[in-house]
Image (spheres, rainbow, N blue to C red):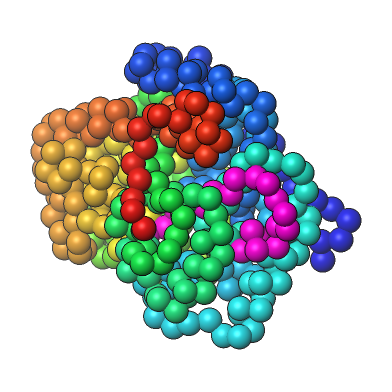
Amino acid sequence: MLAGRMLPVVNVGTKSLGDYATIAARGLMHEIRRLAEPLAGKRVVHLSATAFGGGVAEINYTLVPLMADAGLDVEWRIIHGADEFYDVTKRIHNALQGEPGGLTAQQRETFGRYQRLNAERFGGDYDFVIVHDPQPAGMIDAAGDSTAKWIWRCHIDLSSPNPEVLDFLVPSIRRYDAAIFHLEDYVPGGAGLPASYIWPPAIDPLAPKNMALSAEDAAYIVDQFGVDVSRPLLTQVSRFDPWKDPLGVIDAYRLVKARHPDVQLALVGSMAHDDPEGWDYYNRTVAHAGGDPDIFILSNLNNVGSVEVNAFQVHSAAVIQKSVREGFGLTVSEALWKARPTVAGRVGGIVVQVDDGVTGWLVGSPQECARACVEILDDPAAARELALRGKEHVRRRFLMPRLLRDWLALFNRLAGSGAEDVELVTVAV
C-alpha cells in the first residue's frame, strides 16, 4: 500500500515576512525576529490528512513558508489513507464534536493499521513534529525512539466529546510534549494530557482568498456563475457538512425572501478527499434547495477557487456561517477582514470572532439568522459600521503574523532556548 515511498511533501512556495510589515504591529514583527533567532535551522514537519479543503490546509499554505522565511527548515507532509481509513476518521471527527456512538473493533483496527503504515514511511530527523487533528494522532505510538518534540494541534470543537471515542485517542495524545487548542473550553478535563496551550488560528490577509479585491472585480467574477449582480446576495462559504448547517441556511434564506423577494443565496464549498460524507450532504443540500433558481450551490468542482471565494464574500450583502458546531470557523474572520456584515452561529470559536451587535450578528436558529439578514438588508449603512469594527478586531487578533509568533514562542519553550519567557496561554490539565 505504501511500499517504496515516503509521505509526500506539499509544495507551498515561498513567502516573505517583510510583506506583512505594513499590516502587523511593529512590536509583533520585532518579537517574531527575536524568537526566530535561536531557532535558526531547526527542523520542523507538519503532518496532516489533506493538502486542500478545510482550515488546516488553508493555514499551512501560509504558515509553512513563513516559518521557512523565519529561518526554520520546515516541511509539510500528507499522510496516506484509503476510503476505509477516512470513513473511520470522519466518524472520529464527528464523535469528538459530540455525535453519539462508538467505534467497532474493525474501525479501531483500521485506524491503528494506518497509523503504523504512515509511521513506517515517516523518515527524517526532526526537532519538532506537528500533528494536525485526529487523522495522524496515533503515529507517535509507532515512532520508535524519536527525539523530536511532538505537538498535537487540535482544530475541532472538543467541548462535549463522545467519551468513548475520546478515550480511544487519549493514550496516544498523552505521549505528546504539548497540545494546542483553539479555546480553553476544548481542553478535555481529567484526561491527563500534556501541557496544553490556547491560541486561535489565523488568516493570511495577503493570500488570493483575502487580498484586496474591488467591488467591480468581485461583481465581474460572481456574474460568471449566473448570479444577478444587481440584486442582493447572501453567501455561506463552508464544506457541505451537517455541522455547517447549509439546510438551515436555505431555510433562513426563504424567510428573508418573504421580506426581500429579490434576494439570492450562494452556498460555496470545497470537496476534500478526507471527507467521505461530503458528497452525501452536498446532494442533500441540492435536494433541499428544490431547484430554486436563486440558490447557487458551488464548489471547487465548478472552478470555484480562492479568488472566486474572495469575490463572493466581497460582493455579498451579508456573509453567513450558521454552524451548529465549529472549532473556529476561519471563514468568519475572512468575511470580517473584507468588512462584510457577518451573521454566524453562536457556537465554538465563532464567539471570539464576533461580538454580537458590535462586530456582527450571532444566531442560534434559521429564524434568528433570517432576522439578522433582514436587518442588514434594511439598513446597509448601519451594518457596514459593525463590519468595519469587525475588520479591526481581526487585524488585532486573527492575522497570520500573530500565529507565527505563537508557534515560535512554543518552539523556544520546548527547546529551552533561553527565549522561552514569552507569554503563552496555558491550561492546567
Residue 245 placement, left or right of 298: left
State the count of labels: 0
Is 375 above or below relative to 49? above
Residue 381 placement, left or right of 15: left
Is 40 above or below relative to 151? above
Which residue lies at the image location 48% right of the left edge and 36% below the top edge? 413
Which residue lies at the image location 73% right of the left edge and 58% below the top edge? 144
Residue 121: name its quadrant.
bottom right
Q: Quadrant of the C terminus?
A: bottom left
Horizontal and vertical percent for residue 409?
Answer: 46, 32
Q: Quadrant of the N terminus?
A: bottom right
Query: Which range is magenta?
Result: 138-157
Is 329 above or below relative to 220? below
Horizontal and vertical percent for residue 258?
Answer: 16, 59
Of residue 351 and residue 406, the one placed in the foreground of this image is: 406
Residue lying farthest to the bottom in this orientation: 105
Residue 223 placement, left or right of 316: right
Residue lying farthest to the right in this orientation: 4
Whether residue 342 appears in magenta in the rendering, the answer is no
Which residue lies at the image location 61% right of the left edge and 41% below the top edge? 128
Can residue 230 be seen at all in this image of the molecule? Answer: no
Of residue 43 and residue 174, the one placed in the foreground of this image is: 174
Which residue lies at the image location 15% right of the left edge and 59% below the top edge? 368
Can residue 348 be seen at all in this image of the molecule? Answer: yes
Of residue 202 and residue 179, the one placed in the foreground of this image is: 179
Is 312 above or below relative to 329? above
Horizontal and vertical percent for residue 108?
Answer: 61, 78
Residue 217 placement, left or right of 317: right
Whether residue 142 appears in magenta in the rendering, the answer is yes
Residue 112: name its quadrant.
bottom right
Residue 348: name its quadrant.
bottom left
Horizontal and vertical percent for residue 284?
Answer: 43, 71
